[in-house]
């Protein structure tokens, strides 16, 4: 087969990626690097409009992934690639390490098995340590802790800048990102003819990375999905930055069959998270928070790390995991119709995204579809928003500071608005700059942000007074 130029539809590409969550962004980058012309079709006003906008931001090692699973392989591959490219992309990483803490004798008895599974999974850098060693690493933990597995390779990252960097690199290689564009239907007649809310798109192959709508998108493409999405909500509280000195490490519970459990976790931005819960629900879009659950999380955090009782809550949020009726990833390649579904990327997608993208390219190779020559890696960097590296406000010429809680400068906001993929909505601006994400949650800076973004977003930050 020779490489074709698909000109009979108004727009054409080698590969259409449906969904710009972290998985779709990573896939777009990987295929663009492999020489494919790529169009990403995203229903939301901005990238990261689904599951990827709210998670715990842990870059997992895979120590607790099911042995022998695709998920384990892809978490490890994704993490390894992240570690090899993060500096070039300007992505920082916080090397916290994690403690899987046992709070009862029964849990302590289970730690050796957890460490054993971790080693079986190829993660050598972990040990069972006793209570004295646990307290030496994290003096703020309650005295009741019995022992822990120390997993030194678990890290936290900025969960929004990473996918932004991936998709920006794809853009630099000529990929297109159609935001506010819904995939309506598609049919394969040797090429894919996709009907979107923006018109027709002809594509050589299609990759479904639609997260919480993975089964729905398969159906719209006329592919019988082999899974049903069952959203699983996770609620969080975000504690003020004063909490960070009490929580230098990720504190994990001994997991059960359903969930990794409630975690106490430093963030790359200097806060501490307590969450997530694991609550099945039917709604795929609304992730509400409930007072009783938030109080439970607050109480939980204070019991495990007593100093957290006195630290104010900065924010609360909830995210939805694209779970299915089974625990494993639901990845399918259909060679006869050149379609790949990356479904059910439930709770490790941030870590596995780059690995999933590598895997999708391997599956694609079986389609026998030629691509252009692999591209040189374009130099793309995203601004640092984490506490791990110096921020813009720390430079002597920083100019106006717009958000005083998160110390966001005017020029950081202007740079985001003028960037290669400017935010499509206010949430996107927050994720690109952290403006409005601090203690006051935008109370003091929203007026200035509304002024700076006037006319840019379909839903403005503030409605102009009439008259
Ligand atoms: C509470 C919680 C905690 C988590 N913690 C971690 C963690 O610490 N570490 C980790 O590695 N992972 C974690 N995860 C998992 C991770 O967030 C997910 O695995 C990942 O976000 C899934 O990404 P995705 O790209 O598959 O899906 P999504 O982010 O949902 O992206 C799919 C995109 O497709 C779009 N779309 C859907 N239908 C259409 C259509 N018809 N047309 C066009 N576009 C469409 C959506 O708008 C959406 O933007 C967590 C998840 C949650 C919810």
Image: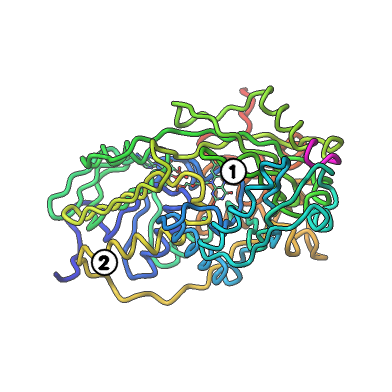
Q: Is residue 303 magenta?
A: yes
On the rendered structure, is 66 left or right of 256?
Answer: left
Q: Residue at x 39, y 40 (%)?
A: 326
Q: Note whether residue 411 is visible.
A: yes
SS of the residue under disc 2? helix
On the rendered structure, is 457 left or right of 172?
Answer: right
Q: Residue at x 19, y 58 (%)?
A: 7
Residue 292, image x, y percentages: 68, 22
Rendered image coloring scheme: rainbow
Residue 245, image x, y percentages: 83, 52
Question: As rendered, which of 429 and 84 lies closer to the eye?
Answer: 84
Q: Residue at x 24, y 55 (%)?
A: 203
Mark in front: 2 vs 1: 1
Give the residue pinned by disc 1: 255
Q: For residue 364, which quarter of the picture?
A: bottom left
On the rendered structure, is 71 left or right of 445?
Answer: left
Query: Earlier along the polypeptide chain: callout 2 or callout 1?
Result: 1
As drawn, the label of residue 183 is: none
Q: Residue at x 47, y 52 (%)?
A: 66
Q: Is residue 114 magenta?
A: no
Q: Main secondary structure of the magenta part?
A: helix
Where does the C terminus fall, quadrant-wise? top right
As drawn, the label of residue 365 is: 2
Where does the N terminus fall, quadrant-wise? bottom left
């Amino acid at each position: 087969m020779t490489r074709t130029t698909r000109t009979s539809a108004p727009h054409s590409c080698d590969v259409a990626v449906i969904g710009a969550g972290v998985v779709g962004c990573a896939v777009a980058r990987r295929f663009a690097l492999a020489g494919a012309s790529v169009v990403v079709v995203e229903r939301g006003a901005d990238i990261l409009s689904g599951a990827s906008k709210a998670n715990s931001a842990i870059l997992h090692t895979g120590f607790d992934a099911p042995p022998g699973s695709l998920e384990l392989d892809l978490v490890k591959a994704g993490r390894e690639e992240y570690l090899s490219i993060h500096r070039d992309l300007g992505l920082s990483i916080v090397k916290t390490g994690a403690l899987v803490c046992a709070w009862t004798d029964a849990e302590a008895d289970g730690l050796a098995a957890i460490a054993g599974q971790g080693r079986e999974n190829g993660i050598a850098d972990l040990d069972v340590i006793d209570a004295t060693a646990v307290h030496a690493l994290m003096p703020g933990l309650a005295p009741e802790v019995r022992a822990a597995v120390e997993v030194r390779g678990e890290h936290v990252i900025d969960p929004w800048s990473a996918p932004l960097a991936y998709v920006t690199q794809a853009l630099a290689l000529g990929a297109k990102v159609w935001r506010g564009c819904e995939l309506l239907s598609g049919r394969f007649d040797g090429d894919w003819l996709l009907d979107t809310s923006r018109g027709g798109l002809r594509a050589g192959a299609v990759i479904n990375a639609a997260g919480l709508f993975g089964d729905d998108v398969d159906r719209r493409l006329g592919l019988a999905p082999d899974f049903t999405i069952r959203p699983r909500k996770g609620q969080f509280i975000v504690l003020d930055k004063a909490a960070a000195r009490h929580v230098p490490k990720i504190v994990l519970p001994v997991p059960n069959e359903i969930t990794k459990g409630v975690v106490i976790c430093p963030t790359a931005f200097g806060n501490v998270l307590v969450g997530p819960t694991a609550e099945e629900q039917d709604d795929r879009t609304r992730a509400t928070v409930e007072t009783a659950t938030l109080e439970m999380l607050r109480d939980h955090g204070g019991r495990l790390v007593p100093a957290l009782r006195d630290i104010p809550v900065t924010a609360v949020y909830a995210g939805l995991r694209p779970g299915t009726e089974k625990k494993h990833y639901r990845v399918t390649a259909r060679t006869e119709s050149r379609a790949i579904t990356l479904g059910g990327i439930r709770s490790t997608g941030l870590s596995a995204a780059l690995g999933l993208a590598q895997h999708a390219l391997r599956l694609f190779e079986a389609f026998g579809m030629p691509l252009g020559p692999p591209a040189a890696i374009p130099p793309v960097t995203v601004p640092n928003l984490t506490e791990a590296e110096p921020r813009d406000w720390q430079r002597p010429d920083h100019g106006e500071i717009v958000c005083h809680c998160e110390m966001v400068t005017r020029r950081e906001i202007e740079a985001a608005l003028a960037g290669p993929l400017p935010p499509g909505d206010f949430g996107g601006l927050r994720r690109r700059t952290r403006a409005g994400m601090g203690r006051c949650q935008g109370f003091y800076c929203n007026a200035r942000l509304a002024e700076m973004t006037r006319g840019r977003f379909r839903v403005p930050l503030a409605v102009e007074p009439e008259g």
